[in-house]
Image (tube, rainbow, N blue to C red):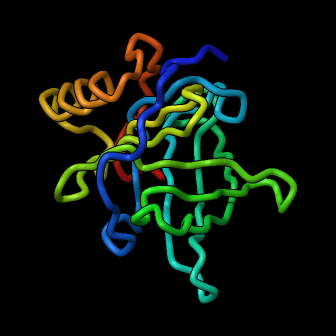
Amino acid sequence: MPIGNRSTPEPSRPVSLQRDLGLWYEIGRYENGFERGLEAVTADYGERPDRTIRIVNKGRVGSPAGRTRMAEGRAKVVGGSANAKLKVSFFGPFFIGDYWVMDHAENYAWSIVGEPSGRYLWLLSRTPAPSAETRAAIELRARELGYDTKLIRVTQQGVAGAR
C-alpha cells in the first residue's frame, strides 16, 4: 500500500469518548486489504463493561446492496493521549493496530482517523451523505494534516437506513 502521509502528525485535539461513541459512516478511505471491495462501510463504537471499546465494522461486498460483511473488535485508550490514540484488535490478541483520531469536528459530526505509518486513513461522518461543503472541509483538513487526498477512495453509502 502506498504511504499517503510520510510525516504523520500527532492527533490535533483531545477526544471525548462519550461523544465519539456511536455510529459513524465511512465516506472515504485509503484502500486497504481488509476493506477491499467494500461499500456502505460503517463503524459502531460502544463502551464495554471492562471499560474497553467495542467496535463493530460492517460493509457490503461490491455495492451498497451487496452481502454484508462484519468484523468485531476491541479498543483500548492509550494512556496520556487525551483519548485520541487507541490500540485496536480485530483478530484476537496477536494483531494490535494503532488507531489515531487525527481531528474531529467540534460537534463530532465528522472525524479523520489515521495511524503512525501514514498508510491508513479514514474519513468518517455521522451521516451517510454529508454536504459537498462538509466533505470538502474534511478533505481540506486531511490535506492540512499532510495526507495525500488523491489516494482517498470514496465510499459509496447508497440509501441511508438500508443497513
Residue 117: where, in percent of width, then height?
A: 60, 30
Q: Position of residue 138 (x, y in %)?
A: 25, 33
> Residue, x 29% and y 53% (percent of image)?
13
Image: 135 above or below 21? above
Judging depth in this view, the residue of 106 and 72 nearest the camera is: 106
Q: Residue furthest left?
A: 133
Left or right? Give the position of 95 relative to 82: right
Identify the residue at image location x=74%, y=53%.
Answer: 96
User: On the image, which quarter does residue 63 sit in?
Assistant: top right
Left or right of 92, for residue 75:
left
Give x and y (percent) for residue 7: 47, 24
- Residue at 40% over, 53% down: 24
* Tally of numbered tags: 0
* Foreground of the two, 42 or 152: 152
Farthest residue, direction right: 94
- Quarter the N terminus occupies: top right
Q: Nearer the viewer, residue 110 or 102?
A: 102
* Percent position of residue 148, x then y: 41, 15
Residue 52, quarter of picture: bottom right
Q: Is residue 37 above or below residue 67?
A: above
134 to 140, vertically: above or below: below
Farthest front residue in view: 80
**Residue name at image x 42 percent, y 43 percent:** 10
Q: What residue occupies the far top of the structure in this picture?
A: 150
